[in-house]
Image (spheres, helix red, strand yellow):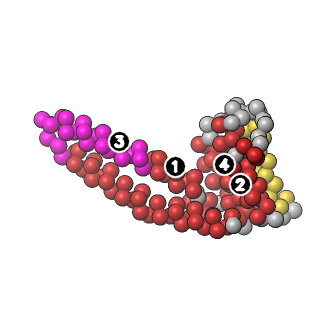
Amino acid sequence: MAAVADQARRRIERNLHDGVQQQLVALILEVGDAEANIPSEMPELAQSLSTVKQGLTGVLDDLRDISRGLHPAILSEIGLQPALNGLVRRSPVPVELNAHLDGRLPEPAEVAAYYIVSESLTNAAKHAHASRVHIDVAVRDGWLHLSVADDGAGGADPARGSGLVGLTDRVDAMG
């Protein structure tokens, strides 16, 4: 079940990247060209096009964020460690990441680890109000070991939301 959902997320991410995102980039470039060709005696029109271009850029940025949340291309392309580095950079809570990964892991393990860390960082910021997160990732004796800890309020309860249940399902699906 988790593998099917991951494939669907990857397909949606690819469609967003190859379709909608590219169309938005083309529109932003066209508006920029139009803006550059406006005569100086038409400042209101120049301002209007600038506002449209900023709005399109904001939509593109939002779409990229959504797309990354579906299935990060970096995970498929170059692996878990760079994908985790990206999560850490975007985290609103400071994160100490200790990752000791040599090479690639099986794709289901990388995907599961990525989403566990992603959900954990979201929970640390949104629910636990943590001021710091510590993540350890390593492969030992053929097993992926992942630990995420924060200094937040605690009290996570799987009965109060689907995030923790989804993470448990991912791990259970991998055996």
Does 38 lie within the magenta span? yes
Q: Which residues are magenta?
A: 37-60
Q: Residue at x 30, y 43 (%)?
A: 52
| C-alpha gap between disc 2 and disc 3 | 36 Å
| Distance (Cα) linking label 3 and label 4 | 29 Å
CA distance separating discs 1 and 4: 13 Å
At label 2, counting other C-alpha atoms closer than 10 Å, the crowd grade (few under 14, some 14-19, many 20 or more) is some
Q: Position of residue 163 (x, y in %)?
A: 69, 49
Residue at (54, 66) in percent of width and height: 11
* Residue at the spot 79% in from the left edge and 61% down from the top edge: 172
Upstream in sequence: badge 1 or badge 4: 1
What number is the disc on residue 2?
none
The residue tagged 3 is 54
Residue that carries the numbered disc 2 in the rendered image: 166
Residue with the mark numbered 1: 65
- Of pointers 3 and 4, the one earlier in the residue sequence: 3
For disc 3, the neighbor class at 10 Å (few under 14, some 14 to 19, many from 20) is some
Whether residue 166 is visible, yes or no, is yes
User: In the image shown, does 74 or 60 lie closer to the viewer?
Assistant: 60
Q: Are marks 1 and 2 in contact (CB under 8 Å)?
A: no
Q: CA distance from mark 1 to mark 3?
A: 17 Å
Asked if residue 163 is among those painted magenta in the image, a careful observer would answer: no
Q: At numbered mark 4, what does the secondary structure look like: helix, strand or loop?
A: helix
